[in-house]
Amino acid sequence: MGESTARGAGGAVGAGNAVAAAAGAAAAGGWRRAGVAGAAIGVVAAGAAAGVAIERLTVGRGIRRKARLALDATGPYGTLRGTPGYTVSDDGTELYYEVDDLGPEEEGPRRRRLFGRRRPAPMTVVFCHGYCLNQDSWHFQRAALRGVVRTVHWDQRSHGRSARGLAQGDGLPVSIDQLGRDLKAVLDAAVPEGPVVLVGHSMGGMTVMALADHDPRFIRERVAGVALVGTSAGKLGEVNYGLPVAGVNAVRRFLPGVLKALGSQVELVERGRRATADLFAGLVKRYSFSSRDVDPAIARFAERMIESTPIDVVAEFYPAFQEHDKADALAHFRGLPVLVLAGDKDLVTPSSHSEAIADLLPSAAELVLVPDAGHLVMLEHPETVTNRLTELLARTGAATSVTAVRATRSAQG
């Protein structure tokens, strides 16, 4: 991203995706096309490659491939579906969302009218995912809240089931501001009335901030609470991604050029990325999780989401984080219940960025740093994140009770 360091937003996830793609280009004989910039990638990949090398001493490549296929076939994560819907952003991009409505037991009593008055619209919780992910990244929280509170899950432009950004087809770069306007289009279509709780992870949190910047009146009139998970209000150029100085400098200098070059060689890179699946899996695990005992099915689920993001999408989104600075927009959340949550070992958007957000919302924000957690904290420690979200809903005055949400937790997975 320009002259800045790699800008994380969904997991170096984005950085890891780019790194593995570059490594894949090498495997496919494509380093010449990527130029000297490709050499810098080795610095970033070294740590993950070492872990993969150790694994290869004990587990054959064929067995690893069969294990991935088995996990893909049987893994329950990402299988939850709601009522589908589409809306169009201000540049004509089609955005996909799903609605999980209240269960019959919650809906029934509300149908009675008091003195002929129309029943109030229910609270809706809207989930925004991060870079190189999709709406399924909230699988556990979706399962826990299902049938007890109305929820909306949507795919950011060029991710998941949403269309590629039309403006990007015309050569315009993606901006965080555009993502905020995309969120407003989804809200207008999926939540035309009633109170809203906005939940955003990483780039999704930045999207929520951009909405506040774009439409502070909506925040004042409709938003009942906000959760910002593993995200940042700016200064992403200071993140070192757990790399030594030489690695950080290499990334700052070369990765933007590598991404641009790889983005123009999509077919080559995708072939190479498939050929380096083990390296890619190691990178995803390093930059997504901190716990040593992460369920292999969850790790594979995260890997599958990230690897489904085409390299040209990775490239076109990447520069947006250079300009991201929404510290001033946080002022629009003052007076609202706000949950600021991060993994204490997040290498992509370090917990210090969440602390900075909480410092700017001293009277409203509850800061939660989850021990032994990385960037995909909602997958790594789902019960902790769900508990905190449930408590936020209680603070907003939502009809859903903490007891009711916890009673549904057995549906997770």
Image (cartoon, grey):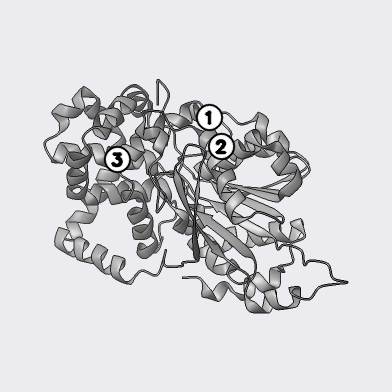
Q: Label 3 amino acid?
A: Ile
Q: At x 60% / y 42%, what residue is drawn?
A: 208
Percent position of residue 148, x then y = 64, 70
In the picture of the structure, the residue carrying the numbered disc 3 is 311
In the picture of the structure, the residue carrying the numbered disc 1 is 324
Percent position of residue 293, x then y = 41, 61
User: Which element carries disc 2, helix, strand or loop?
Assistant: loop
Are there few (<14), some (14-19), or many (20+) residues within 10 Å of tag 1? some
Nearest to the observer: residue 73 or residue 197: 197
Which mark, residue 232? 2
Q: Is residue 393 left or right of residue 66?
A: right
Q: CA distance from mark 3 to mark 2?
A: 23 Å
Q: Label 2 amino acid?
A: Ser
Between disc 3 and disc 2, the foreground one is: 3
Picture mark count: 3
Q: At x 75% / y 57%, what residue is drawn?
A: 395
Q: Is residue 365 left or right of residue 152?
A: right
Q: CA distance from mark 3 to mark 1?
A: 21 Å
User: Which element carries disc 1, helix, strand or loop?
Assistant: loop
Are there few (<14), some (14-19), or many (20+) residues within 10 Å of tag 2? many
Q: CA distance from mark 1 to mark 2?
A: 9 Å
Q: Examine the rendered structure and indicate whether residue 221 appears above or below residue 264.
A: below
Which numbered disc flags the more N-terminal residue, 3 or 2?
Answer: 2
Q: Examine the rendered structure and indicate whether residue 275 appears above or below residue 390.
A: above
Are there few (<14), some (14-19), or many (20+) residues within 10 Å of tag 3? many
Question: Is the Cβ of the residue at disc 1 closer than 8 Å to that at disc 2?
Answer: yes
Residue 305 figure quarter: bottom left
Q: Label 1 amino acid?
A: His
Q: Is residue 67 left or right of residue 158?
A: left
Which numbered disc flags the more N-terminal residue, 1 or 2?
Answer: 2
Between disc 1 and disc 2, the foreground one is: 1
User: Which element carries disc 3, helix, strand or loop?
Assistant: helix
